[in-house]
Amino acid sequence: MHVSLLVLLLAAVLIASGIYMLLERTLSRIIMGAVLAGNGINLLFLLAIGTPGTPPFEGSGAVEGMSDPLPMAMVLTAIVISLALTGFGMALSYRSWQLFGHDEVPDDVEDLRIADRSRRLVERHRHEHIERVGFEADEQREERERERMQEEAEKACARSQDDRSDDISDDFTSDEDVEYSLTESDTDDEEESS
C-alpha cells in the first residue's frame, strides 16, 4: 500500500489546527475548528482506502482489485454530519450575535460557583488541620471528623434550599405582587351584581 506523506502531513496539520480552534471561546472559531478537524479526519479515511482499484460492482473484475467501499461510505457520512453540524453552529452563532452583539461563549455561572465552593472547602480543611495537628487521639479525631461531615452535610442541605431562589426567579412576580386597578367593565360588573 502506497501512502503519500504529503497527504498525511496535510491531514495532521488540519486536525491539529482544528483542535486548536475548537478550544477557542468564540463560536465562529469553534465551527471552523470542527470543519478543519473533520476534513483532516476525512483525509485519513481516504488514506485508509489505499490504492484505487476497480469499482466494487459485481462483474467488474477480480475481487482482489476492487476498492473497499466502507471508508468511502464513512467519509460520505462524515461529510453529511459535518454539514449539518456546521449549519447548526452557524445558526447558533448568528443568534448569539443578534442577542448579545458577540459570539463569545461565556463562563458557566454554576461551574464558577462549584469551583469557588470547593476552594473554600479546601481552605477550611487546611485551617482545621493546622489547628489540631498532633493534639488528639485517633478515636477522637475520627469522631470529630464524623461530626464535622454531618454538620457540613446539614449546612449543604440548608444552602441548597437557599440556592433555590436565584436571581432569575426573583425577576418574576406572582399574582399577589401585582396591584390591580379596576377597569370600567369591572366596575360595571360590580354594579350589576349589587
Image (cartoon, grey):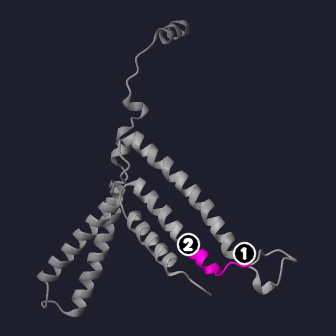
Q: Quadrant of the N terminus?
A: bottom right
Residue at 34% x, 54% y: name it: 106
Instruction: Identify the image quadrant of residue 24.
Output: bottom left
Corner quadrant of residue 183: top left
Residue 20 belongs to the span the image colors magenta: no
| Residue where numbered disc 1 is placed | 69
| Near-viewer residue (108 or 164) | 108
Task: Specify the principal SS of the magenta part.
Answer: helix
Mark 1: few/some/many CA within 10 Å (<14, 14-19, 20+) = few
Name the residue at 35% across, 49% down: 165
Q: With 51 as the anchor, is 32 left or right in this view?
A: left
Which residue is found at the position 53% from the left and 10% from the top?
A: 189
Disc on the earlier residue, 2 or 1 = 2
Determine the secondary structure under disc 1: helix
* Percent position of residue 178, x then y: 38, 27
Q: Which residue is mark 2?
A: 43
**Vertically, is 63 above or below 105?**
below
**Residue visible at 19% across and 73% down?**
123
Return the x and y of residue 171 as percentages of the image width and height: 35, 39
Above or below for 115 versus 142: above
Q: Which residues are magenta?
A: 43-53
Mark 2 to mark 1: distance in Å?
Answer: 15 Å
**Relative to 130, is 112 on the left or the right?**
right
Residue 51 vs 157, above or below: the answer is: below
Q: Amino acid at mark 2?
A: Leu
| 15 lies left or right of 142 | right
**Foreground of the two, 19 or 107:** 19
Q: Residue furthest right?
A: 59
Q: Is residue 52 magenta?
A: yes
Label drawn at residue 21? none
Under tag 2, what secondary structure? helix
Task: Name the image quarter holding residue 45.
Answer: bottom right
